[in-house]
């Protein structure tokens, strides 16, 4: 997944620009991708939900975001996982529910790997 491609201010209900809208591009294959917008203040949980639903999958499995784009995700330097939030397992990963998109994607062009349905690989 490559994200974000652009940043633009989004207006809150009071007309201020407290957050920005980020445009993401998520792909399953080179020719199969979706582009969508999400607020930079959204959690990584909400980002995963948007990705999964954009491909018409049910959002009903464990998942994580990993900095290692190819190979063994356990070797990723940066990891965000759902199971950490649920209090399961021991890991150095951060929580997808507590981490905001803007923290995980600090600059335009940052890439990460979403591993969905971790139990089945």
Image (cartoon, rainbow, N blue to C red):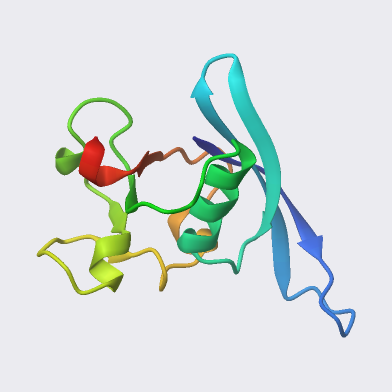
Is residue 8 shown left or right of residue 79? right
Locate residue 116, reporting x and y percent.
Answer: 37, 43
In this view, the residue in front, 119 or 5, is: 119
Residue, far left: 90
Residue, far right: 15
Locate residue 56, reporting x and y percent.
Answer: 60, 39
Is the C terminus in the top left, top right, bottom left or bottom right quadrant?
Answer: top left
The total number of labels drawn is 0
User: Which residue shows up at 48% across the image and 41% down it?
Assistant: 110
Is residue 109 shown left or right of residue 6? left
Q: Is residue 54 above or below residue 60?
A: above
Residue, far top: 31
**Residue 10 appears in which quarter of the rendering?**
bottom right
In this view, the residue in front, 88 or 41, is: 88
User: Which residue shows up at 51% across the image and 47% down it?
Assistant: 58
Q: Is residue 106 visible?
A: no
Locate residue 27, reporting x and y percent.
Answer: 53, 28
Is residue 48 shown left or right of residue 21? left
Q: Is residue 11 above or below residue 93?
A: below
Q: Is residue 34 above or below residue 45?
A: above
**Residue 89 appears in which quarter of the rendering?**
bottom left
In this view, the residue in front, 62 or 17, is: 62
In this view, the residue in front, 40 or 58, is: 58
Is residue 121 shown left or right of residue 18? left
User: Which residue shows up at 58% across the image and 66% down it?
Assistant: 42
Q: Is residue 59 visible?
A: yes
User: Which residue shows up at 15% across the image and 39% down it?
Assistant: 75
Locate residue 70, reporting x and y percent.
Answer: 28, 25
């Amino acid at each position: 997944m490559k994200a974000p491609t652009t940043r633009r201010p989004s207006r809150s209900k009071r007309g201020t620009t407290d957050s920005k809208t980020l445009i993401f591009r998520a792909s399953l294959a080179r020719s199969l991708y979706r582009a969508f917008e999400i607020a930079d203040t959204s959690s990584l949980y909400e980002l995963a939900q948007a990705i999964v639903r954009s491909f018409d999958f049910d959002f009903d499995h464990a998942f994580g975001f990993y900095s290692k784009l190819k190979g063994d995700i356990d070797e990723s330097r940066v990891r965000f996982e759902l199971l950490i939030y649920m209090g399961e397992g021991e890991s150095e990963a951060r929580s997808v529910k507590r981490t905001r998109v803007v923290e995980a994607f600090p600059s335009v062009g940052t890439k990460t790997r979403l591993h969905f349905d971790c139990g089945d690989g």
